[in-house]
Image (cartoon, coloured by chain):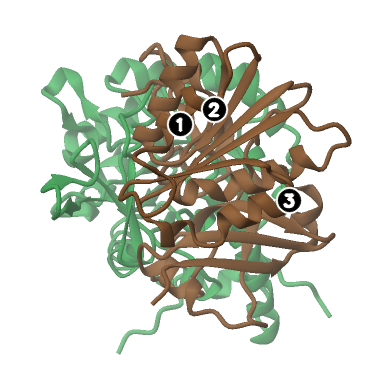
Chain colours: A brown, B green
Amino acid sequence: MPEIFRLTLRAPEIAANARPGQFVMIQTSPGYDPLLRRPLSIHQTIGKDQVQLLYKVVGKGTCLLAAMTPGQKLNLTGPLGHGFELAGRKAVCLVGGGMGIAPLYFLAREILRTTSPPQCVVLLGARTATELGPLPRDFMDIGSRQTYLATDDGSLGHYGFVAELLPQHLGPDLPWTVFACGPHPMMKAVASQCRKQGWECQVSLEAIMACGIGACLGCAIPRAELSGPYLHVCKDGPVFKAEEVAWL
Amino acid sequence: MIEADLRVTIGSLVLKNPVLTASGTFGYGKEFAPYVNLHYLGGVVVKGISLAPRRGNPPPRIVETAAGMLNAIGLENVGLDRFISEKMPYLREIGTRVIVNILGDSLEEYQTLGQQLSEVEGISALEVNISCPNVKKGGVAFGTDPAMAEAVTRAVCAHSTLPVIVKLSPNVTDIAQIARAVEAGGAQAVSLINTLLGMAIDVKSRRPKLANIVGGLSGPAIKPIALRMVWQVAQAVKIPVIGIGGITTTEDALEFLLAGATAIEVGTANFVNPRASQEIVEGLGRYLTDNRLSGISEVIGGLILP
């Protein structure tokens, strides 16, 4: 039984406006169980009118999504939040862990389709090879020549965490910008290395949220200084500068 | 064909229709402008305002439950000054009633809020959240004691020129008794219910799912309880009752109106479907037309008992 799915939707207004790092709130059931929409980052847009999401079945909502059949209608709102800032970066590194890879593919496509793309390194990690599935091939197919892999169980690529790949693949002489999305410990490790090296680091964060539009205030996260008003993942993010947030 | 008359009167306040948005579920209005024609609504009740800004509780703040959700936001808000300078200019232009929800931890704070907001142009009424703890009385919530509920109502009414709606907590033994107390204190209306205190535990980690341990339950799960309380309170007081609690569809709204509510507030449904409030306004209009009723007043309190 596969547990990772891609869902392609015809949603012209979202496709036309989506930027890498933005997300949608998707209704998984027309009834009251589950009640709330699920926030999912945009994996890519296809043509002028399609949006693709990548998700792992983790509970009732994603299980219902996985049971959808072609032609069915879904209710979703988006694109929401602020995406990655990539204009003018000379050397970029995308670090994705597990389902955190979803928005990075959209970002990689945006970066690599420019006429003179910056130096681009892609580091992908997962618990095991099957969790990466077709993703490494997808990145290579869009021209990501420097794609390196890591798995927690050593079944593919580096035997260990993806954040451990940074020092060996990012040369010291370039002004790197690192885009990271994945489990909290992974992003924390990436943010810490970037701080030490003086590299810019943008992270895409996840939080439990009810509305996705800044009304419920559920998705609060503490600022780096641990005081002042909380940041809200849906409106202030989901992409933040790593130094803005507290890495607890 | 005559257009259905959805107008209702709450004390001295006339609403173009009985559909309001519940405090804390609709931001300061602007968040929903991409989804809702705000001027279609009977009014917008904004996120609760305290005198000073409040940071709110640490995360996790929300957890989904069966047909509902628990929240422990902790009344995070921008505070009175920023509300007036940053939020009111937009709210003045939305073309419907603006009702400001206020909260405090002392009688003085409620008084000051009532007084200062009365001087602000563009506000139609105040909704007083009395579910907050009274710090001078050992943290007992104002809304759980009839005498304190009456006192806080009296304090706001005495210092404000705006109509005062008091929002009642359901976490009491006899909500009708509290309703009568705030009526005696001078409230022009009551709104109910606020969230029901609840809890959820992660069995793997054995920890509460909310950092605050407990939180307020809202959503369709609480609707039957809310409806029962609205029905009880509507019989206990002469002032208008505003029904709140899990209202998600037109039919839900109609149930509350039949039980005796003069207006309703849409809350958690705004998160699930950002267009819910406007859809309910449209649904009520269609209901009147389809049933050849001339006005919504023919529905209010129309419950037929066995």
Q: Which is more toward the observer, B125 or A28?
A: A28
Q: Chain of mark 3?
A: A
Are the residues flagged by discs 1 and 2 in contact, CB closer than 8 Å? yes
Q: Is residue A149 above or below residue B231?
A: above
Q: Secondary structure at mark 1?
A: helix
Q: Which residue is mark 1?
A: A165
Q: Which is more toward the observer, B226 or A135?
A: A135
Q: Is residue A51 above or below residue B210?
A: below
Left or right: A157 in relation to B199:
right
Residue occupying image coordinates x 16% and y 17%: B136
Please tell me how many numbered marks the rendered image carries. 3
Q: Which is more toward the observer, A177 or B299?
A: A177
In whole angstroms, how far apart are the C-alphas of marks 1 and 2? 6 Å
Are the residues flagged by discs 1 and 3 in contact, CB closer than 8 Å? no
Give residue A28's position: percent from left, percent from top: 50, 69
Give residue A236's position: percent from left, percent from top: 57, 30
Q: Which residue is mark 3?
A: A142
User: Around disc 1, counting alpha carbons within 10 Å, would you say few (fewer than 14), some (14 to 19), or many (20 or more)?
Assistant: some
Q: Which is more toward the observer, B7 or A192?
A: A192
Q: Which residue is mark 2?
A: A169
Query: Which amino acid does the dot numbered 3 rest on?
Result: Ile
Residue B117 seen by the camera? yes
Left or right: B84 in relation to B241:
right
Residue occupying image coordinates x 62% and y 62%: A76
Q: Earlier in the sequence, mark 3 or mark 2?
A: 3
Q: Earlier in the sequence, mark 1 or mark 3?
A: 3
Name of the residue lying farthest toward the right: A115
Name of the residue lying farthest toward the bottom: B306
